[in-house]
Image (tube, rainbow, N blue to C red):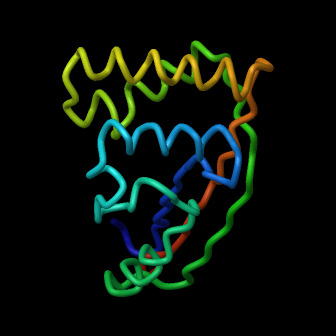
Amino acid sequence: MKPGGALVIAHFDWLPLPGNVVEATEQLIIRYNPPWADLPVLKLSGSTGVYRDWLTDAALAGFIGIETFSFDEDALYTHEAWRGRIRASAGVAAAGLSPETIAAFDADLAQLLRERFPKEPVPVPHRVFAVIARKPGK
């Protein structure tokens, strides 16, 4: 990076709040894929959407003027869209679950949505978290 250049890292995470569709979905993912709850890289389940280690990483890499910001936003999903999003997630298809397991998971997720979150679209709370830092120099 050129001296004076800006580093921007941004992330858009769903928020598992008590009783919401994210929390219920994560519980279902863990039922089908228990190791997903303890992945060390991002702690994928139960995330707060804030990554404080990024600040230390930027400082240790020599960046200065480190700033952060965050805001929350609901993303609206139909049941079908949420199911598709989750099937493709790190906890399901990307985790290497078998096609049979994915189909069983998807059927259970469809039932969960019908029973607990019947109104569409379903608001899914997300947090945008960003870090901005500068490379020293010009």
Report x, y in % for residue 78: 67, 17
Q: Quadrant of residue 120?
A: top right
Q: At x 67% / y 67%, what residue is drawn?
A: 69
Q: At x 60% / y 42%, what residue is drawn?
A: 22
Report x, y in % for residue 45: 45, 54
Where is 120 relative to 90, above or below? Answer: above
Q: Name the foreground residue: 97 vs 89.
A: 97
Q: At x 37% / y 61%, what residue is drawn?
A: 42
Where is 136 relative to 8, above or below? Answer: below
Q: Is residue 52 left or right of residue 127?
A: left
Report x, y in % for residue 82: 57, 23
Q: Name the foreground residue: 54 vs 16.
A: 16
The count of marks equals 0
Quadrant of the image containing the N terminus: bottom left
Q: Quadrant of residue 105?
A: top left
Q: Name the foreground residue: 114 vs 17.
A: 114
Where is 89 relative to 100, above or below? Answer: below
Q: Is residue 83 left or right of residue 75?
A: left
Where is 111 relative to 71, above or below? Answer: above
Q: At x 24% / y 37%, what residue is drawn?
A: 95
Report x, y in % for residue 133: 51, 74
Q: Quadrant of residue 119?
A: top right
